[in-house]
Image (cartoon, grey):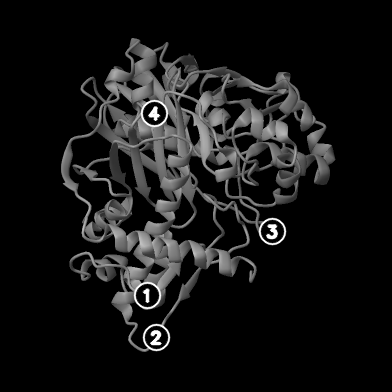
Amino acid sequence: MYIGLDLGTSGLKAVLIDESQAIVAEASAPLVVTRAAPGWSEQAPSDWVDAADSVMRALAAQMSLESVRAIGLSGQMHGATLLDADDQVLRPCILWNDTRAAVEAAKLDADPVFRTLTGNIVFAGFTAPKLMWVARNEPEVFAKVARVLLPKDYLRLWLTGEAVAEMSDAAGTSWLDVGKRDWSDDLLAATGLTRAQMPRLVEGSDVSGQVRDALATRWGLPKGVVVAGGGGDNAASAVGVGVVKAGDAFVSLGTSGVLFAASDAYQPDAASAVHTFCHALPDTWHQMGVILAAADALNCFARIAAQPSATLTGGLGDLQAPGRTLFLPYLGGERTPHNDADIRGAFLHLDHATDQAAMTRAVLEGVTHAIRDSYDALFATGTRISRLIAVGGGSKSDYWVRAIATSLDIPIELPVAGDFGGAFGAARLGMMAATGAGVAIATAPQIARTIEPDTTLTSAFSEAHARYRASYDALKGLT
């Protein structure tokens, strides 16, 4: 059997799969984010360790773990976990959604070498600008930094005693030469760091170490259980849903929205705010458009309307052409394609006839237009999507999925019920590391049905998208 651990922002999830890749047990533990100042978002790495121990004990309580051969890791990206020479944590981890380093990010992004080597904008949420913030504001901490680890890689250190990162997560630090899949000494030097302070790199399907004997004994594991490199959360999810070769993609309608496309070539376009990262598998990359509020936008409107989101979407009937009312889902700024931390959401063109159903459709359409922005940005880099799978809570709304299919003019496949997220993908990577299996085991899930685009409405959605883009341009200067 094989275990996948997915270290998220709000919790840590574990799944146990057998040789047929069926999930036979699962467990989770909650995590808390602290916000000591506006724009700050931090967690204590010790909480991750406690959560991991909790879920491993929970799995062991459900069934014997004596047949486990490997553990794979998935996790939230970009977090700055700072350790001293004794591997002691120096301060709380600064998380991916922490925006305190916006000034430092802009300074790094102004240096052309960063976009040239990483293929990406230096976003405030990335790891490198956080270290610059620490150097400027907490110099006594920065002086003690002997090692910088990403969140899931701190768990790896605890599990194995090895300081290791893998390519997909490392690509989100602004220190990786993404084309060469190696740390860049020039980028590290630009932030006052050296390669010696970085973990060694492996591919996500490689062995990174073995579970320490004391932990194996505690949980009833056999000795010698290997720990795979694993992946950043979206890359691991892609492995879980079988998006591992060029042409395959998934759209995730979770709290945020992601359009993720696998690629067998490195083809960045940083100016588009598309994320171009290494995949969790060798010789593979991926591109990703990220919008910061997808289901979160619907949930926000549901709170205002005092109705469950499923109630709001369940009564919409057949897909309609977008109305005049527009919704911009920029509740906390936007990444792709704007890289705009200041823009905020808006309803436009409300009139006396606007009712709750019209506003609900506008919210769904606004997120659909944002996904279309990401699609257009990916298309401009040369990425082509031949197969698209929908995941996440928002994919339960047929109206929403059909709107996206129509806007992109691509059929969207809906998997059968099941968990194909980061923990499942991490377990698959563990299986690869333990057995030597390759990408062939990262199959797509069984598809329950396919939502076809409504070709009679494609042009209407394109026209509405053009108005949506013009509205961003008009509002940008008002924030």
The one of 50 and 229 positioned closer to us in this rendering: 229
Tell me the mark number nearer the camera, choosing from 1 and 3.
1
Say few, some or many: other residues with alpha carbon within 10 Å of mark 2 (under 14 / 14 to 19 / 20 or more). few
The one of 270 and 394 positioned closer to us in this rendering: 270
**CA–CA distance between discs 4 and 3?**
33 Å
Looking at the image, tell me whether mark 4 or mark 2 is earlier in sequence order. 2
Looking at the image, tell me whether mark 2 or mark 3 is earlier in sequence order. 3
Say few, some or many: other residues with alpha carbon within 10 Å of mark 1 (under 14 / 14 to 19 / 20 or more). some
Tell me the mark number nearer the camera, choosing from 2 and 1.
1
Secondary element type, mark 3: loop
Looking at the image, tell me whether mark 1 or mark 3 is earlier in sequence order. 3
Image coordinates of residue 396 in percent, x first then y, are: 25, 55
Secondary element type, mark 1: loop
**CA–CA distance between discs 2 and 1?**
9 Å
Name which residue type carries label 4: Ala
Tell me the mark number nearer the camera, choosing from 2 and 3.
2
Name which residue type carries label 1: Arg
CB of mark 1 within 8 Å of CB of mark 4? no
Name which residue type carries label 2: Asp
Q: In the rendered image of this protein, does residue 72 appear above or below residue 249?
A: above
Image coordinates of residue 67 in percent, x first then y, are: 29, 17
Please tell me which residue is depicted at 28% across the width and 41% down the height of the picture: 389
Of the 4 image quadrants, the one containing the N terminus is top left
Looking at the image, tell me whether mark 4 or mark 3 is earlier in sequence order. 3
Q: Is residue 340 left or right of residue 470?
A: right
Please tell me which residue is depicted at 53% across the width and 64% down the height of the picture: 472
The one of 290 and 396 positioned closer to us in this rendering: 290
- Residue ID for mark 3: 37
- Residue ID for mark 1: 324
Say few, some or many: other residues with alpha carbon within 10 Å of mark 4 (under 14 / 14 to 19 / 20 or more). many
- Residue ID for mark 2: 351
Secondary element type, mark 2: loop
